[in-house]
Amino acid sequence: MLKTALSALWKGDRQADRVVPPSGFTAQLTLFVAATMAFLAVFALALSLASGRLATIWGQELARTATIRVVAPVDQRAAQTAAALRILETTKGVASARALTDSEQQSLLAPWFGPELAIDALPVPRLIEIIEDKTGMDPEGLRLRLAAEVPGAVLDNHNRWRAPLVKAASRLKLLGWISTLLITATMAAMVTLAANAALSANAQVIAVLRLVGATDGYIAQAFIRRFTLRALTGSAAGMVLGMLAILLLPSTDDAGGFLTGLGFQGWHWLVPLLIPFLAGAVAFAATGAAARRTLKELA
Amino acid sequence: MIEFENVAYSYGGGELLSDISVKLAPGSFHFLTGPSGAGKTTLMKLCYGALLPTAGHVTLFGNDVRSLDRDDIAMVRRRVGVVHQDCQFLNHLSVAENIGLPLTVSGRHAETGGDDLLELLSWVGLSNRADALPPELSGGERQRAALARAVIMSPDVVLADEPTGNVDWEMSQRLLKLLVELNRMGKTVLIATHDLGLIRATKAQVQARVLRIANRRIQLAGADL
């Protein structure tokens, strides 16, 4: 039955379309609603996919890095840094480790202190960047060894600040999917309201059609086709506008990176293309249900 | 064709019709008469599945109406042409398209372009009104358009509910002549009317039986007419 309904929808029946009078204003409202919902759905999807991406990055890539701060008087700092690096060379699970240079540390601090600061005048701790290999290292063991041999070295494997960020990103992703679901449900509700209005406005037309021997399927088809096509075209327009808006977002730079990363990457650009089809399917089902409900009550 | 067996119908309150047994044989011509509110329209509706009997059996073309689903009822209506007293049309389509509507909805739209429709239009005298919209028609023109629409599928049965209710005597004679012609072509005809003059005038042209609804039952009216 669904197959025949779909093929009838595809082929269309110009005559069946004509038996239901055209409805100018409400038709435009349905188009508008479909467009708006598709526009919003694009952003909800972008939010879900982008926060999902962030959660992955924070969860996986940052998990394989750690930092050692060497806090020592200026005259001992170089020696302690060298000692810490020697320990790291013999630590299992460390792929590479290197001390940041003065100029790198200066650029890290520049956002707070400004570029003119003479960093060597301050007791700034030296940072050592550690990149782990796939097996990962044992942070507790490393801490013990550092405590014994390099008293000024503090290991930070980023767990403390990473965990809540990953949690927040996952929560955002969930919110994005819930919004997408709600938008779909709202769309179904709107189309049902519009279809019900159209069906009751055309009660006399339906009565005449039943009298001259039209089947419920024929009558329903005229309405289903109309609303499905409206939802399809409206949401296609809304989807295109939404994608354009995402494209025109200020481009991501390194400084604000993870905050302005809203958007699509790679194959994710294809996901919003599904929106019009989903909207069409929702309208198809909603109008069909409304029509069957209304027709069942008629003679 | 259409058979009633101990049929009763009630609208919730009391029974409007009870113990109705009647048979419309192929090619017969029946009048249905009785006072206003006696149940003429209800009985007509039982004949094309718009209402289901509350008791007894209505058989349409050999099938009990209760065993028919909504699509079956639609198929029955393609074999039964109905003319209502207040005929309704699709007001956004022309008279010609409205008359061809039964063909359109049964997937035979191509035939509306043929000569049959033109012939039918001239038979009911609406050739020059083919492109008009239904709201522009007079009462008599509406009745004739409804009759044309009722017969375009070449139905086996034509049911007319007060077809002459809104028209003058001359027009009612014309309509009746069309119905008599249909009966001569072999169609079963049932006309509900309270106009006894019309019945008398018709009896001269065709062998018609008169069913009268009185006291919720149907009686075969005799020679008093």
Image: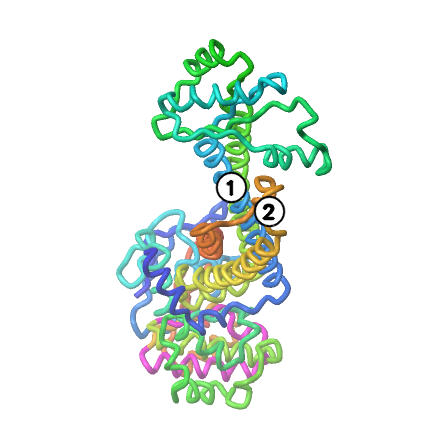
Q: Residue at x 44, y 63 (%)?
A: A219
Mark carried by residue B107: none
Is disc 2 placed on a helix, strand or loop? loop
Give whichever of B67, A180 is nearer the camera.
Answer: A180
Rendered-image quadrant of the N terminus of chain B:
bottom left
- Magenta stretch: includes residue B158: yes
Mark 1 — residue?
A48
- Colour scheme of this structure image? rainbow
Instruction: Tell whether A7 sits left or right of A155.
Output: left
- Magenta stretch: includes residue B162: yes
In this picture, is A83 found above or below A210? Answer: above
Is disc 1 placed on a helix, strand or loop? helix
**Kind of residue indicated by mark 2:** Asp
Which-is-in-front pick, marks 2 and 1? 2
- Mark 1 is surrounded, within 10 Å at the Cα level, by few (under 14), some (14 to 19) or many (20 or more) other residues, namely many
Position of residue A83 measured from the top left corner of the image (x, y, whole percent): 48, 19
Q: Bounds of the magenta span? A: B157-186
Give whichever of A29, B154 is nearer the camera.
Answer: A29
Which quadrant of the view contains residue A274? bottom left
**Kind of residue indicated by mark 1:** Ser
Question: Would residue B36 be visible to someone looking at this image?
Answer: no
Mark 2 — residue?
A253
